[in-house]
Amino acid sequence: MTSETDVLPPVEPPALIDADIHNVMKDPRDLLPYLAKPWHKQWLATGTGVGTPYYSTVGVLRRDAVPDDGGPPGSDPAYVVKDHLDRYDIDYGILTGSNTLEMSLNPDMDYGNAVCSAYNDYLLDQWLPVSPRFRGSLVVNHSDPQAAAAEIDRLGGRPDIVQVVMSSAARMPFGQRFYHPIYEAAERNGLPVAFHPGTEGRGISGPPTPSGYPSRYMEWHNALPTNYMAHINSLVCEGVFEKFPTLKFVAIEGGIAWLPHLMWRMDKNFKALRDTTPWLRKLPSEYIREHVLLTTQPIEEPEHPEHLVQIYRMCGAEDMVMYSSDYPHWDFDPPKLALAAFPKDIRGKLQAANAAKLYGLTVKPARGGA
């Protein structure tokens, strides 16, 4: 027989999860305690070493998100909790890193591996302990899949690490077997693989569009979803999800409205050309719905908001999309603004339910720390 004191309080699920928060270093020297000594001079002199050809007149980081004691926006974990998580009542924030994502595009793979590992140790030491509301993404160098797999095995078992993340810019589409060691390691560790834009056309990656190089930042930014279409098309057609049946892929910050077009085109072509992909046992759209998730930011803003809801319903995106703010970048989307167009049944999934299921974040966290 139990008394009232023996009854546990009901478990409360998270109400809002942000799937894309960019944490940055306050100073490049912050990485040095975690980076092998031979790389110190190169890191301080060149950073990631891949350059940035496109200039944004509005900058990349929000000027109103500078920490109280100075430094770049997104560089102070306690301030991120106060300025972002607390302000918008966010239960969990998934940290996706910043410029270290582009290490996959440096021609020196050893340097790329060293910086990625150093960043991951920095993340575990300087960010994740600050608040139980933070969860981390392991950055890997996808240009060296064997090393990336070893990095996933090194740290992928940590409960505060919830996914692998890599840059969406690459030398070849992500479905090709060159990358399979990464997916095997991610599946072995029960982690989804995410990719994030922002480095298309830089370092050793190819042109940022199939037609070559745009002239300016706005053109480049408008066309980023084409890269996402190429990667998802490749992942499905190359049979990645047949070979790795429990693997999930997260397409961060690539938009959503292009998805129905891609699914319909792939399904139509599959019916006539399926002999070229005999390993596929389902329609391409079924693989996408089962294995791919996307994030809201930068959410499309049509003249008639209900059109966006229709697009989500057309392809089942209400079960595939997670809210993301992109804090502290210039095109940041606060949750109420980003989700205002959606009816309640969809909004709850986007706010938290889809991310909670993917990342195993089923219980609202304590609000201690920071």
Image (cartoon, rainbow, N blue to C red):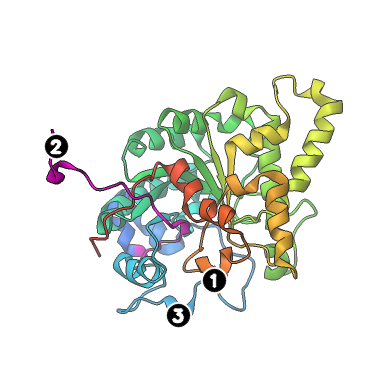
Which label was assigned to residue 166? Answer: none
**Residue at label 3?**
64
Specify start and end residues of the magenta stretch as a single range: 1-28
User: Residue shown at 77%/55% (left/top)?
Assistant: 212
Q: Secondary structure at mark 3?
A: helix
Q: Quadrant of residue 197?
A: bottom right
Q: Secondary structure at mark 2?
A: loop
Name the amino acid type tagged 2.
Answer: Thr
217 shown above or below 20: below
Image quarter of the N terminus: top left
- Residue 216: x and y in percent read 71, 70
**Relative side of 245 to 281, left or right:** left
**Residue at label 1?**
60
Callout 3 crowding tier (Cα within 10 Å): few <14, some 14–19, many ≥20 = few
- The question of residue 84 being in magenta is answered with no
Gap between marks 1 and 3 measured at Cα: 12 Å
Viewer-side residue, 357 vs 262: 357
Secondary structure mostly seen in the magenta stretch: loop
Task: Point out the frontmost of discs 1 and 2.
Answer: 2
Q: Secondary structure at mark 1?
A: loop
Name the amino acid type tagged 3.
Answer: Asp
**Residue at label 2?**
2
